[in-house]
Image (cartoon, rainbow, N blue to C red):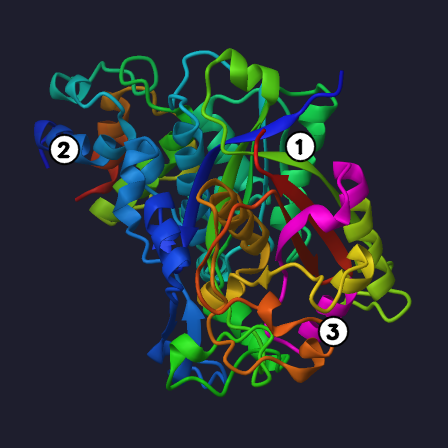
Amino acid sequence: MDRRVVITGLGVVSPNGVGIPAFLSAIRGGVSGIRFDPAYKDLHFNCQVAGMPEFEWDRLKDYVSEITFHGLQGHALGYGIMAALDAWTDAGNDIGARETIWDTGCVFGSSVSECEVVKKIFNRVDAGEAKKLGSRVIEQMMNSSITAYISGRLGLGNRIIATSAACATGTQAILMGYEYIRQGVAQRMVVGSSEHVDPYIFGAFDSMRILSRKFNQTPQRASRPMSETAGGFVPGSGAGALVLEDLDFALGRGARIYAELLGGACNSGGQRNGGSMTAPASPGVIRCISDAVANAGIDPRAIDLISGHLTATAADAMEIQNWCLALGRNGRNFPPVNSLKSMIGHSLSAAGSIESVAAVLQIVHRFIHPNINLEDPNPEILRQIDPDCLPVKLVEKELRTVAKANFGFGDVNACLIFSKYN
Amino acid sequence: MERRAILQELKKVLYPYTENKELLENIDENTSLVKDLKINSANLVDIIIDAEAKYNIEIDFDSAEKIITVGDCINAIAEKIP
């Protein structure tokens, strides 16, 4: 019999809420986590707003040993550890198992090493002081540092894999965890992703002229997915994590089940047919969504909500068109669509996991979070779908299935289908 | 500086790397850093770097390799400070 995969734990570090209760309240209320940062002004950035979690670094003392905490640096690492461990305890598990947990693994992604931390290494080495770097640098600079910290703290002994697929990282990591459980490789997987946009990465995106720059005086209005006045994305930071579990295993231990992950797909447009390093090819996106729907074994008409990638760039209208073609639905037949990025910006690698946490919360608590800053929908989008598909206020609604997709640089796509657990 | 004074100061250097703080109370020159204090051997380099910074001295790699006990640590430091 086919194994079913359910979600039993959630954790999040988001610009508009750290921890599930705060995050749930924020997304219900349409609370923006975008703020002006004078440092960006001093650096002459065009975009001077960002979504940064209100993260108390010292709280990590409750998550890692005192020895590990001493010398720990790197925000993305901190966010990832907190989100993953919160998800683990939320699923009813203890931290710090005495024995290795062989049936549980971890797939956790990130996109770039933290330049602020790397800079300290450059300075030391260039000054001829490599000797003073100490033992803690490599473990925090490895691409696999987050999975190493998470799995070490929890004692996980199954597949431990660090991933990277630009803005599709989080969604892809969740799909990989799902596949390992489906294949019978693991009973449980801790999955998610984390990102910290430091000034160096921020500056490089700013130079590409794809960031929001006209709302520096009104930061909460700066992230405007699907709006006519959308003028680029707002960088965000944070982490999201889920505990995925084989249904029978979850039932066996009496776990609380939030929702089911029915399936998904991940592909690339091959940077052909309009796809490039920075733009997704429509045929790849459409195929990815169609494959996800087929893999989940659902009728596209059963989708009650789309959690889009929708970053607030010129690509938004194309994305809506791709959803229309992939699902064979448009106009009034199109499902409601929302973009969490209107509240928290685009947290790159972390986007997929934070948005997936939001998708699961919307299923569990029966609502559709509002799109904020959408008082002026893009007419190109309204030519394809009905204005009622773009909720600007909280909608209380029972959701059967939610489609969640993200598309990343390198023309990579990932789509997940979440559903209510029946 | 007197060896006993160095030992007292050394406790502060060892503190962040010692899981069980009580073990630090009764250390003497024969206490092994790894075996008795259960310090992760990878952290020995961090202890040396911290001690170097604290006393503004340089402990060369060869001397550092000989450090097994608290007494060895004191030797390496006492050699370098005036």
Q: How many marks?
A: 3
The residue beneath circle 1 is A178
Spatial CA distance of label 3 from label 2 is 76 Å
The answer to whether residue A248 is above or below residue A416 is above
In this rendering, which labeled residue sits more in front, label 3 or label 2? 3
Q: Residue at x 14, y 28 (%)?
A: B7
Q: What is the magenta range?
A: A293-322
Q: Residue furthest right?
A: A273
Front residue of this view, candidates A17 and A367: A367
Secondary structure, mark 2, is helix
Q: Are marks 1 and 3 on the same chain?
A: yes
Spatial CA distance of label 2 from label 1 is 56 Å
Neighbourhood count class around disc 3 (C-alpha, 10 Å): few under 14, some 14–19, many 20 upward: some
Secondary structure, mark 1, is helix
The residue beneath circle 3 is A384
Disc 3 chain ID: A
The answer to whether residue B53 is visible is yes
The answer to whether residue A213 is above or below residue A408 is below
Q: Position of residue A347 (x, y in %)?
A: 53, 60
The answer to whether residue A280 is above or below residue B16 is below
Spatial CA distance of label 1 from label 3 is 33 Å
Q: Residue at x 82, y 46 (%)?
A: A291
Q: Is A388 within the magenta?
A: no
The residue beneath circle 2 is B6
In this rendering, which labeled residue sits more in front, label 2 or label 1? 1
Q: Position of residue A264 (x, y in %)?
A: 72, 42
